[in-house]
């Protein structure tokens, strides 16, 4: 379990959820954009709830491990969604294709010189 401190409040959620949340927050910050998400968690009173979060460039979120009694809070669907959103915001690596469309090295134009 992880303790999440955010906007003057604290809640507890599962490890995978916390990791996906932190990665998504980092990706949003890189693009200077924000999003509102609902994260399942346990409040400091012990109630299970969905916590609404506005996550963006100015978000100051802290995640730290904590031992709590009870089952790990999980939401595989949300984790997958957050990871997909994070991937959409990740820089893409492109590969260059040769100018003549052939596979492999750079075309040689030595024959054109003679």
Image: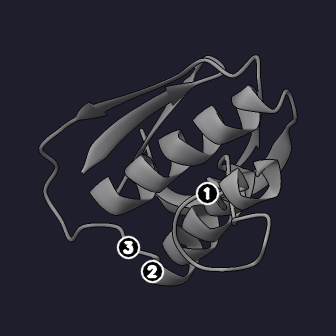
Q: Name the image colouring.
A: one colour
In the foreground, 17 or 26: 26
Q: Residue at x 66, y 80 (%)?
A: 102
Q: Secondary structure at mark 3?
A: loop
Where residue 88 sits: x, y (%)? 72, 61
Mark 2 or mark 3, which is nearer to you? Answer: 2
| Distance CA(mark 1)–CA(mark 3) | 50 Å
Marks 2 and 3, Cα distance to the nearest angstrom? 6 Å
How far across and down, in percent of the image, does residue 3 sit? 34, 36
From the image, tell me which residue sits under label 2. 76
Picture residue at 55% right of the left edge, 83% below the top: 77
Which secondary structure lies at badge 1?
Answer: loop
Q: Which residue is mark 1?
A: 106
Question: Is 36 situated above or below 82?
Answer: above
Q: Is residue 50 visible?
A: no
Give the quadrant of residue 103.
bottom right
Position of 6 with respect to 88 (left or right) is left
Is label 2 in contact with label 3 (beta carbons under 8 Å)?
yes
Q: Which of 5/32 is in front? A: 32
Query: Residue under circle 3?
Result: 74
Q: Is residue 107 above or below residue 84?
A: above
Q: Earlier in the sequence, mark 1 or mark 3?
A: 3
Left or right, 69 with respect to 101, comes to left
In the image, what residue occupies the spot 85% across and 38% down? 34
Q: Residues within 10 Å of mark 3 (few under 14, many from 20)?
A: some
Residue 66 appears in view: yes
Q: Position of residue 72 (x, y in %)?
A: 24, 67
Cα–Cα gap, marks 2 and 1: 46 Å
Which corner quadrant of the image does residue 92 belong to? bottom right
Q: Is residue 91 above or below residue 29?
A: below
Structural crowding at the residue carrying mark 2, measured as other residues with C-alpha within 10 Å and reported as few (<14), some (14–19) or many (≥20): few
In the rendered structure, the answer to whether residue 34 lies left or right of residue 88 reads right
């Amino acid at each position: 379990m992880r303790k999440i401190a955010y906007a003057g409040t604290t809640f507890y959620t599962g490890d995978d959820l916390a990791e996906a949340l932190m990665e998504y927050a980092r990706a949003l910050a890189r693009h200077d954009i924000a999003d509102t998400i609902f994260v399942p968690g346990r409040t400091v009173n012990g109630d299970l709830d969905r916590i609404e979060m506005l996550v963006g460039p100015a978000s100051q979120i802290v995640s730290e491990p904590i031992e709590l009694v009870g089952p790990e809070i999980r939401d595989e669907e949300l984790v997958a969604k957050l990871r997909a959103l994070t991937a959409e915001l990740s820089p893409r690596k492109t590969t260059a294709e040769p100018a003549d469309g052939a596979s492999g090295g750079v075309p040689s134009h030595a024959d054109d010189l003679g």
